[in-house]
Every structure is written in C-alpha cells, then in structure tokens.
Image (cartoon, rainbow, N blue to C red):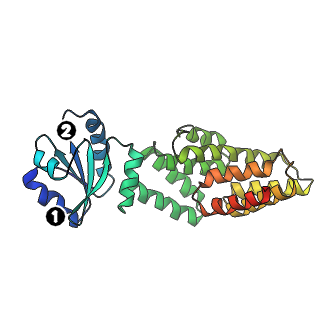
Amino acid sequence: MGAIVEVTSPTFEEEVLARSYQTPVVVDFFAQWCGPCKMLKPVLEKLTTEYDFVLAAVDIDQNPELARIYQVEGVPDVRVALQGQLYNGFVGMLEEPQIRTLLEQLNLSSAFDEAMAQLETIRASGDRQQLGAQYTTLLAQYPDRPALLLEAAQFYLKQGELTTATSLLDQIDPLQRPHGAQATAVRSLMDFHQTIAELTPTTPADQQYLAGAQAAIAEEYETALEQFLALVQSDRKYRNDGGRKALLTLFGLLGDEHPLTQTYRKRLMQALY
C-alpha cells in the first residue's frame, strides 16, 4: 500500500516535504554502522505493505547536512512529515505494536484493520458459520496478531470449543499489554462455562451467579456486571467472594479504559467500602 524511497539532501524537499501534502511520510534517519537501525528497517518496510505511507530512508553519514538541519543526535531517529512539516516520532528501537500505535495516531488504517472491521460487520449479521470461516482465513493470514487471536479465542469459547480457544490463548504473550491481561481474563471465562454446565441453582445467590455467567459468555457484559455486583452486595461469602472475583475477571477482559470497567469499578468500591 505504501512506498519506500531513499532520500538525499537534493531530493529531501520533493520526496519528503512536498510529498507529505498528499500522504504521511515516515522519515528514517539511519546509519550503516547502527545495529538498532538494521533491526528497525525490516519492521518499517513490512508496515509499508499494510499502511498507506511513504518510508523515506536517510543515511546520515551520506547526508550530514540533513542530520545537522534536523538535529539528529542519535540513530535510528524516526520523524513524521505532514503538510510540509517534520515532527518528532521516536529515537531508538521500538517494537512493532508501538509503531502501529504511532501509525494509527496518524489516522492510517491497514489491511488488517479493514479485515477486523469486516469481522465486526459479519458478527453483527449473526452469521456464525461465515464468522467462523472468516476467523479461519484471517488466522492463516495473520497468525501473530494478539487482537485477532483474542477475538477468535472468544468466538470459539462461545461455541464451546474450549481446546481451540485454549490453543489460541497460548499464543499470546501474557506480559504483552493489554492483550496478555485480556487473554488471562478469557481463560477465566472458561470457569463460567463449567459453572453453566454444572450448577443447578437452588438459592438466590446461585441464580445471580448463573445469570452473570450466562451473560458474560453471551458478551452481554453490562448485564453480567450488574448480576455479579448484586451478588457482592448480597453475599460476599458465596463461592469465596465469587461475585467480586467475577467482576475482576470482566474488568480484565474489557480493559481499564472501557466505560463499563470504569463505571462498575467505582460501584464495586462503593459496595465494598
């Protein structure tokens, strides 16, 4: 989708500044002797195949005047040109997800983003068979994308295919934010499946917990949160503070920034204290 150009002092004005009026230009100031530069280069080049931007590579040893004008003190030094102006990006090596975040801040979308949006459209249609086929296709194309692995795991979990869901979750680094914490939360959803299969409600607390578990599996998160919060308020001893633990599971699944997490975390604090 994008393009890669090698830029020198005579071509910088045309290839970077003028071109940035039509499309963002990511400028990679690098040096041949720089180890991190060699690590960063293939990552940036890979991203040009997905996002619509121009990658302009500038060798600072061959173009010292550009390094001086733009005060490049260390490499790799990545800048972004927009509307004829050069803005700071980052210095040093960044991981691919962090660079993707930078590109998203430029309002750039990738083929992967478009595929994920198409997934949402299929999901809204309610066609489970088509949705499953689309997950199969995308997992073959993008086997290392945590967001896709997480969504697919939730889909298969909802279908009751726990082995497949577990296999997908195992591919997500538990330390990677935010997907690692979300993967841990999805694993906890498997307990809800077991509850639904095994629990025969005989008390109001049983009914509340079962209703919350069913709503969580159905992705009706506000209903689930409401049921578990009611359980916290009525019976802290049930399942060894099971209502609170279930709320924390859903907070981890939704993420700290989700409006439901923020609302129900405050309500949980009020209920506890």
Q: Position of residue 139 (x, y in %)?
A: 48, 46
- Residue 216 lies left or right of residue 27; in this view the side is right
Q: Mark on residue 111?
A: none
Amino acid carrying mark 1 in the image: Ala
Name the foreground residue: 226 vs 272. 272
154 sits to left or right of 24 = right
Q: Badge 1: few (under 14), some or many (20 or more) residues near its Cα, within 10 Å? A: some
Vertical relation: 75 (above or below) 263: above
Q: What residue do we see at 30% from left, 40% from top?
A: 40
Relative to 158, 40 lies left or right: left
Query: Residue shown at 42%/57% (left/top)?
Result: 113
Give residue 238's position: percent from left, percent from top: 86, 48
Q: Which numbered dot is residue 18? A: 1
**Residue depicted at 23% across the width and 34% down the height:** 34
Q: Would you place residue 263 above or below residue 140 in this image?
A: below
Kindly indicate the quadrant of the structure image that contains residue 257: bottom right
Residue that lies at the very extreme toward the left in this rendered image: 10
From the top left corner, tell me how far across and down residue 254 is, in percent.
Answer: 61, 55
Q: CA distance from mark 1 to mark 2?
A: 24 Å
Specify whether residue 110 is in view. no
Tell me which amino acid carries mark 2: Ala
Q: Callout 2: few (<14), some (14-19), or many (20+) C-alpha neighbours within 10 Å?
A: many
Tag 2, which secondary structure?
loop
Is 7 displayed left or right of 259 in the figure?
left
Q: Residue at x 64, y 61 (%)?
A: 262
Residue 246 visible: yes
Residue hosting label 2 = 31
Whether the residues at callouts 1 and 2 have beta carbons within 8 Å, the answer is no
Of residue 253 and residue 193, the one placed in the foreground of this image is: 253
